[in-house]
Image (cartoon, rainbow, N blue to C red):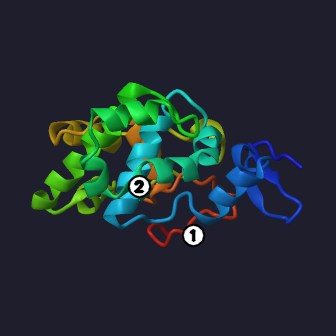
Amino acid sequence: MTPDNGTIIGPDGLARPSWAASDPLLQAYYDHEWGMPVRDEQGMYERISLEAFQAGLSWATILRKREAFREAFLDFHPESVAAFTESDVERLMLNAGIVRNRLKIQAAITNAKATIALREDGGLVDFVWSFQPHNTPAPRTLAEIPTTSPESIALSKALRKKGFAFVGPTTMYALMEAVGIIDTHLLDSHRRGTSGVWT
């Protein structure tokens, strides 16, 4: 059953957006992780890294490669990735388990260093969450979900000033959705409001 708004009622009777309704991996991610608050540095750095790698690709591709990413980037431990050298970049370029894009790999290293430097400014998590808007979208259809916002544009600019790369406004909007800073679950989705951030 597919209501007019773009949600699909699954065999379990729960409403999900079409992107999360057909692929079991995407459904599990949607049901248990997407939109839930991320408030630890390593988790936030991982999400920024994965959102950067996703640019131009499908999120399903990134999810399928996620464990390979975690192995390649040492569980996205900032100190570990910050110590990567050019030889590590070359090694990662040969790793078929991840997205082999030199600029994105280099961005992950750059962003690890920037994450460490940001600790003097209160840390990555508080920095990113400081761009939480006063209200969140309330989309009834997929077409009503924005792809950027004044806050994601501001976050993008602020992170760039702090030395981060591959943090464009659209990528940052996707990050804000993924880590619970905004709630773009459709109003009739079973996940709407479950983050505890927005009521």
Inspect this view and state whether residue 124 appears.
yes
Q: Nearer the viewer, residue 114 or 123?
A: 114
Look at 79% across and 42% down and name the residue there.
Answer: 4
Q: In screen coordinates, is 175 left or right of 158?
A: right
Q: In screen coordinates, is 164 left or right of 149?
A: left
Q: In screen coordinates, is 4 left or right of 107?
A: right
The residue that label 1 is drawn on is 194
Q: Position of residue 182 (x, y in %)?
A: 44, 55
Question: Residue 108's image quarter?
Answer: top left
Q: Nearer the viewer, residue 98 or 133?
A: 98
Inspect this view and state whether residue 166 appears.
no
Q: Nearer the viewer, residue 166 or 104?
A: 104
Label 2 element class: helix
The residue that label 2 is drawn on is 74
Q: Position of residue 145 (x, y in %)?
A: 55, 41
Label 2 environment density (alpha carbons within 10 Å; few <14, some 14–19, many ≥20): few
Q: In screen coordinates, is 8 left or right of 141?
A: right
Residue type (three-letter) at the residue carrying disc 1: Thr
Q: Position of residue 36 (x, y in %)?
A: 51, 64
What is the distance, in whole Å, between disc 2 and disc 1 at their CAs?
30 Å
Look at 64% across and 46% down and name the residue there.
Answer: 64
Look at 18% across and 39% down and name the residue there.
Answer: 163
Residue type (three-letter) at the residue carrying disc 2: Leu
Q: Position of residue 31 (x, y in %)?
A: 66, 63
Nearest to viewer (mark 2 / mark 1): 2
* Mark 2 vs 1, N-terminal side: 2
